[in-house]
């Protein structure tokens, strides 16, 4: 734990130092006069923008417990953040990383003198199904999905390795893997497209009439969480009143950990639920069509904000997108305009010809034009599928 903390702190320091250097360089380059002091400072800062020079400048970075690849990855991540900003301005410019209860650093697996790259012969390698060796840290006991990967006889290269501790004091090790062979088998085609309507009443309704109920993980634990957070707030106020740092307040830290574990429990439950539903949809259908949702705009509605946050729609759509590529399926999103208000049988749109639009309370309705009775969400899912097929045509 100490080694992970030291490397995490070093990674954060180097990243923040890169932010500070570039902020200063931007200000110095605005000085138009050719002042020697300014020019020397610019040259000095420019030279410091690599791991070796930065370690020479800050001697504590020469600590043998710090992985050299941790320093290089921190600088690389800073440059990636700038590239992301230039491509997508919404990401914002790189900012200082603040100290928190979350630790994180990255290293790399190298294969010195190895002709083939496997999961068992690099600087980061698996010794068996339960143990992995990491530079500077040594042997770690792990649990996860590595047993299935270790059975693969083909060449599999480990790239970037990330070690993380979350606020609930759970430690994770994640790896980027590369191989010429796919990691999952492409499933057989089913010739069965499906449209899905996401809503707050049920999690989703598909075009076949199947309904997946909303588990509402956050709502079930909201009362207990509020109680524990009140205790946490009182302990924080007491520590400040007695002029004690929160880091040294044992009762505060115990309560903080309890609250963090409650949050982590809700997150893990929701994540597991979304993984199972998204995998089932992609494996069982050749084409999945969903609405193109703008969750950020929908959260502005205070009456629905809690329900929308609890279901995790954006995460779910992201899972469908990457799993469709993984399993060789197709996933598309369509404009949700009038998918709920349109009769699938005759095409009549509610809110036209003197009719009122359907509200959230209207779960079933009868078309005033053709008289067909509809279940609101099922009808919407059918319209979504029709729009998706028309979009591909």
Image: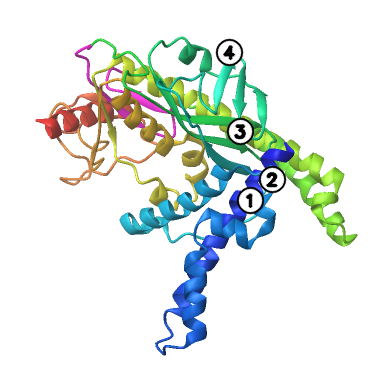
**For mark 3, what is the residue?**
135
Counting residues from the N terminus, which is met first, the one under dot 2 or under dot 3? 2
Residue closest to the eye, 276 or 354: 276
Q: Distance between the residues labelled 2 and 3?
A: 14 Å
Q: Is mark 2 on a helix, strand or loop?
A: helix
- Is residue 71 visible in the rendered image? The answer is yes
Q: Residue at x 27, y 22 (%)?
A: 207
Which is in the foreground here, disc 1 or disc 3?
3
- Label 1–label 2 contact, CB within 8 A: yes
**For mark 4, what is the residue?**
129
**For mark 1, what is the residue?**
10
Task: Report the magenta residues as a range.
Answer: 189-209
Q: How far apart are marks 4 and 2 (CA)?
A: 27 Å
Q: Distance between the residues labelled 1 and 3?
A: 15 Å
Residue 264 falls in image quadrant: top right
204 falls in the magenta region: yes
Q: What element carries label 4?
A: loop
Counting residues from the N terminus, which is met first, the one under dot 1 or under dot 3? 1
Q: Residue at x 61, y 33 (%)?
A: 135
């Amino acid at each position: 734990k100490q080694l992970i903390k030291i490397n995490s702190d070093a990674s954060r320091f180097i990243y923040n130092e890169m932010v500070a250097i570039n902020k200063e360089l931007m200000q110095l380059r605005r000085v138009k006069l050719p002042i020697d002091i300014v020019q020397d400072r610019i040259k000095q800062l420019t030279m410091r923008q690599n791991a070796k020079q930065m370690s020479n400048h800050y001697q504590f970075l020469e600590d043998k417990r710090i992985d050299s690849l941790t320093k290089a990855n921190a600088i690389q991540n800073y440059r990636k953040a700038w590239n992301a900003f230039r491509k997508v301005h919404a990401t914002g410019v790189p900012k200082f990383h603040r100290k928190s209860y979350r630790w994180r650093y990255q290293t790399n697996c190298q294969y010195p003198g190895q002709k083939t790259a496997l999961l068992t012969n690099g600087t980061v390698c698996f010794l068996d199904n339960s143990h992995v060796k990491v530079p500077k840290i040594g042997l770690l006991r792990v649990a996860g999905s590595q047993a299935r990967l270790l059975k693969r006889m083909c060449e599999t290269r480990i790239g970037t390795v990330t070690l993380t501790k979350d606020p609930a004091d759970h430690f994770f090790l994640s790896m980027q893997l590369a191989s010429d062979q796919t990691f999952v088998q492409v499933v057989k085609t089913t010739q069965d497209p499906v449209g899905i309507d996401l809503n707050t009443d049920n999690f989703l309704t598909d075009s076949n009439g199947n309904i997946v109920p909303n588990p509402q993980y956050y709502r079930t634990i909201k009362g207990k969480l509020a109680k524990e957070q009140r205790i946490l707030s009182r302990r924080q106020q007491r520590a400040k009143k007695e002029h004690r740092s929160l880091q040294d307040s044992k009762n505060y830290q115990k309560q903080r950990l309890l609250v963090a574990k409650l949050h982590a429990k809700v997150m893990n439950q929701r994540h597991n639920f979304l993984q199972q539903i998204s995998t089932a949809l992609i494996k069982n259908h050749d084409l999945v069509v969903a609405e193109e949702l703008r969750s950020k705009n929908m959260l502005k509605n205070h009456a629905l904000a809690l329900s929308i946050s609890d279901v995790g729609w954006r995460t779910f759509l992201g899972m469908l997108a990457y799993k469709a590529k993984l399993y060789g399926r197709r996933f598309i999103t369509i404009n949700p305009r009038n998918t709920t208000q349109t009769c699938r049988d005759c095409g009549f749109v509610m809110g036209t010809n003197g009719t009122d639009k359907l509200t959230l309370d209207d779960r079933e309705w009868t078309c005033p034009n053709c008289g067909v009775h509809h279940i609101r969400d099922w009808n919407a899912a059918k319209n979504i599928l029709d729009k998706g097929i028309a979009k591909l045509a």
